[in-house]
Image: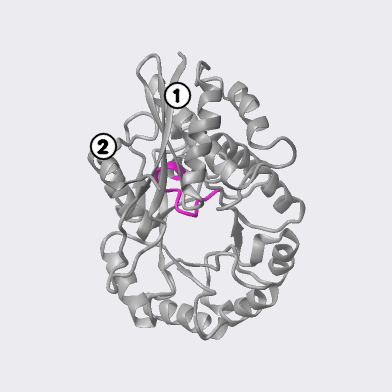
């Protein structure tokens, strides 16, 4: 089996937050397709950052480099591509996103060629993942947070994540929003928080003290740049579990987190870290160090597979914006049922592109 064609394009979708109608974010996708001489077409993807640059890297540099190679030879392919994306040092930024596009499409091909899901190729621990929903955006006021959460409960969601570092009143208002949601949902509903790397170490420490009695499930990306030293200091001073890795979650980054004993939960995202091959490395590192493996950052259907595939997989993310994108982009996508996402039973990542929507959403500049 040989790769005969590669192509990448940029697509933008409309998303809306419930109640207020504002954009839900995360609406851009770089869609990559790799075709083989046996007729298999694999789908890969990246999102958000410098999308036309990512597509150009795939179309003009990485794609041509892998044509003629066997898509199953992942190590050989990465050995050829890594010198192109970084001559020395750690590959980062859009280079990693472009590598993600290629690598995810290769895993999709392998699944389709063998009749197995990517979750099964990764180990097949389960054919589902328990899930949480990212919904608590700064655009909602306190009461709207509660109203949206209750509506999501009625639709089958059981675990919730809200943003902090977004309140105009600073961390005291953040704390008040968290407490308001906790009081409304009761003591047994899991609630996590996410600062998107927006807080200083001091702010994160003070916020943790303010909500210490709210039984927070985890605190994601709490400090700026996710500095491993700052995360380690914060972890020593709070009982709230810390998580990180959604935007720069390559294995070298997680090695630094391990060396500083910085985090409790590993959260790689295959759309940004170089693909499922790199996520597999992170997952094995998490297993070695007895850490749970989760998902964050809008990985959607792709990250569902690594959470389901590995024994230490815990929670997959549902994101209000990502759900809307995937419902437009794919002919069918998993729907939440009683707090759980089922891995599609079709091979590979188990989804089929909606070609009509792909044409409508195309952006050339």
Nearer the observer, 205 or 48: 48
| Left or right relative to 185: residue 291 | right
Of all residues shown, which one is farthest toward the front? 365
Mark 2 closeness class: few <14, some 14–19, many ≥20 residues within 10 Å: few
Q: CA–CA distance between discs 2 and 1?
A: 22 Å
Q: Which residue is label 2 attached to?
A: 355
Q: Residue 128: x percent and y percent?
A: 39, 43
Q: Residue 342: x percent and y percent?
A: 34, 43
Q: Residue at x 65, y 78 (%)?
A: 203
Q: Quadrant of the N terminus?
A: top left
Q: Is residue 90 above or below residue 150?
A: above
Mark 1 closeness class: few <14, some 14–19, many ≥20 residues within 10 Å: many
Nearer the observer, 226 or 192: 226
Determine contact: label 2, label 1, CB under 8 Å: no
Residue 159 magenta: no
Residue 300 magenta: yes
Would you say the magenta stretch is mainly helix, strand or loop? Answer: loop
On the question of residue 358 being in view, the answer is yes
Residue 110: which numbered mark, if any?
Answer: 1
Q: Residue 122: x percent and y percent?
A: 51, 32
Q: Residue at x 30, y 57 (%)?
A: 14
Badge count: 2
The label nearer to you, 2 versus 1, is: 2
Nearer the observer, 312 or 304: 304
Q: Is residue 184 above or below residue 88?
A: below
Which residues are drawn in magenta?
Answer: 293-303
| Left or right relative to 123: residue 244 | right
| Left or right relative to 80: residue 338 | left
């Amino acid at each position: 089996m040989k790769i005969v064609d590669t192509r990448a394009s940029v697509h933008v979708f409309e998303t809306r937050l419930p109640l207020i109608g504002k954009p839900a974010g995360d609406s851009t996708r770089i869609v990559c397709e790799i075709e083989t001489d046996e007729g298999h077409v694999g789908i890969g993807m990246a999102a958000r950052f410098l999308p036309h640059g990512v597509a150009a890297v795939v179309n003009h540099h990485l794609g041509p480099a892998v044509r003629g190679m066997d898509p199953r030879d992942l190590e050989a392919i990465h050995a050829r591509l890594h010198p192109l994306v970084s001559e020395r040092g750690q590959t980062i930024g859009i280079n990693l996103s472009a590598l993600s596009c290629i690598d995810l499409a290769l895993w999709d091909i392998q699944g389709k060629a063998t009749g197995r899901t990517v979750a099964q190729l990764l180990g097949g621990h389960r054919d589902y993942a328990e899930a949480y929903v990212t919904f608590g955006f700064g655009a909602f006021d306190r009461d709207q947070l509660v109203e949206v959460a209750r509506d999501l409960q009625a639709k089958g969601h059981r675990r919730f994540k809200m943003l902090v570092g977004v309140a105009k009143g600073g961390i005291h208002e953040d704390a008040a929003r968290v407490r308001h949601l906790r009081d409304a949902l009761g003591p047994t509903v899991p609630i996590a928080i996410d600062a998107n790397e927006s807080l200083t170490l001091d702010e994160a420490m003070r916020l943790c003290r303010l909500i210490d009695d709210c039984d927070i499930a985890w605190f994601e990306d709490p400090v700026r740049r996710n500095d491993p030293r700052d995360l380690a200091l914060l972890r020593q001073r709070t009982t709230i579990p810390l998580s990180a890795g959604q935007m720069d979650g390559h294995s070298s980054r997680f090695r630094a987190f391990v060396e500083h004993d910085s985090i409790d939960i590993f959260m790689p995202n295959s759309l940004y870290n170089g693909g499922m091959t790199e996520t597999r490395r992170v997952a094995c590192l998490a297993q070695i160090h007895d850490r749970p493996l989760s998902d964050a950052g809008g990985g959607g259907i792709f990250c569902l597979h690594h959470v389901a595939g590995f024994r230490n997989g815990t929670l997959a993310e549902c994101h209000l914006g990502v759900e809307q994108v995937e419902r437009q982009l794919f002919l069918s996508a998993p729907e939440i049922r009683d707090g759980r996402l089922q891995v599609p039973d079709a091979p590979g990542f188990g989804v089929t592109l909606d070609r009509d929507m792909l044409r409508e959403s195309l952006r050339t500049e």
